[in-house]
Image: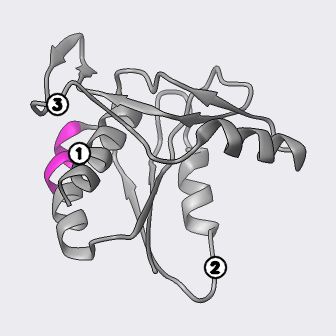
Amino acid sequence: MKVLLTGFGPFKDFSVNPSQEVVEQFEMSGIEIRKRIFDVNREAIEMPYQELLDKFRPDFILNMGLDAKAGALNLETFAINSLKDKSSFSLIKEDIAFQTDLDTERMALELCERGIPAIKSDYAGSYYCNFIYYQSLYWTNKN
């Protein structure tokens, strides 16, 4: 099995992004893991990420990001076709939105049962967490 883990570098007031720390520290034997930390800007993500997906062809993708206001892990169900960057709005592909095949509600309940605060979320925002998630779901839908 091939797993792709992504996170982001420093963001706003966070000199260390927790998503970067999780990606860097994650280890699991018996699977091929590719890790990638992205700068928080479109140019650093869009084409490099597409190239990574096409070359690595992961079986499973876990994109992690930072919501500084979240009180729990937000397990995102949908990614929408938008990116709000520097006060501009742009459509990034033709599909309006994608939904994961994973049961995020069940996953959140299981995490909570293990003492990890988690919730199912239907809105990944309109910034780079959503942007990379949309790219992932777009790629998996086409492949």
Spatial CA distance of label 3 from label 2 is: 34 Å
**Depth order, front residue of 13/82:** 82
Task: Say what amino acid the circle numbered 1 marks.
Answer: Tyr
The answer to which image quadrant residue 112 occupies is: top right
The answer to which image quadrant residue 59 occupies is: bottom left
* Mark sitting on residue 95: 3
* Disc 3 crowd, CA 10 A, few/some/many (<14, 14-19, 20+): few
Taking the spot 18% from the left edge, 67% from the top edge, the residue there is 54
Q: Position of residue 98 (x, y in %)?
A: 31, 35
Q: Is residue 72 magenta?
A: no
| Magenta stretch prevailing secondary structure | helix
Would you say 67 lies left or right of 141 here? right
Work out which residue is located at the far top of the displayed protein and give it. 87
Task: Say what amino acid the circle numbered 2 marks.
Answer: Met
Would you say 132 lies left or right of 96 here? right
Q: Secondary structure at mark 2?
A: loop
